[in-house]
Amino acid sequence: MIPSSSKVTELPFVINLALSTFIVIYAAAGVLQIFPAKVPMLAVVSLHVLPPLVFSFIHGAWFYRIRGIVTFLALCVIVGNILENLGVRTGFPFGHYYFTELMGPKLFVVPIMLGLA
């Protein structure tokens, strides 16, 4: 549900600053991919996953409160992980693929970081 225009409030400066910082960190992760020999891949993957996750949590908590965003994030992690595990094990719906150890520890056959993404 999108808040009606009468309920929409501006985000405080501190929250806007934090959200902007997470966007910059995420953009920097894209640049770091250019230098794979100097930056560990797990660090790049972490910077691609964690800042957007925190951004989503802060932004969602502001508009949908903690309970709403935690429910949303839990559903996303559970459904996303089930579908990725199904895809790796059966090839449905994306074809056969696998994940290497570069993305860190796995839950079944899918990296935990991917479930958070």
Image (cartoon, rainbow, N blue to C red):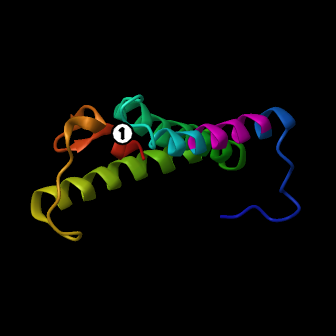
Which residue is pictured at 28% across the width and 32% down the height?
104
Which residue is pictured at 80% across the width and 65% down the height?
4
Q: Which residue is mark 1?
A: 113
Quick check: 9 above or below 14?
below
> Does residue 13 appear to the left or right of 69 in the view shown?
right
Task: Give x and y (percent) for residue 93.
Answer: 22, 71
Q: Is residue 50 visible?
A: yes
Whether 25 is among the magenta residues is yes
Q: Answer with the quarter of the image where residue 7 lies.
A: bottom right
- Circle 1 packing at 10 Å, graded few (<14), some (14-19), many (20+), is some
Task: Give x and y (percent) for residue 17.
Answer: 78, 36
Quick check: 78 above or below 15?
below
Task: Please state the extent of the stretch shown in magenta in the rendering.
Answer: 17-26
Q: Is residue 67 visible?
A: no
Which residue is pictured at 20% across the width and 53% down the height?
85
Whether 40 is among the magenta residues is no
Q: Nearer the viewer, residue 109 or 10?
A: 109
Q: Which SS class for mark 1?
A: helix
Magenta stretch: helix, strand or loop mostly: helix
Q: Nearer the viewer, residue 7 or 18?
A: 18
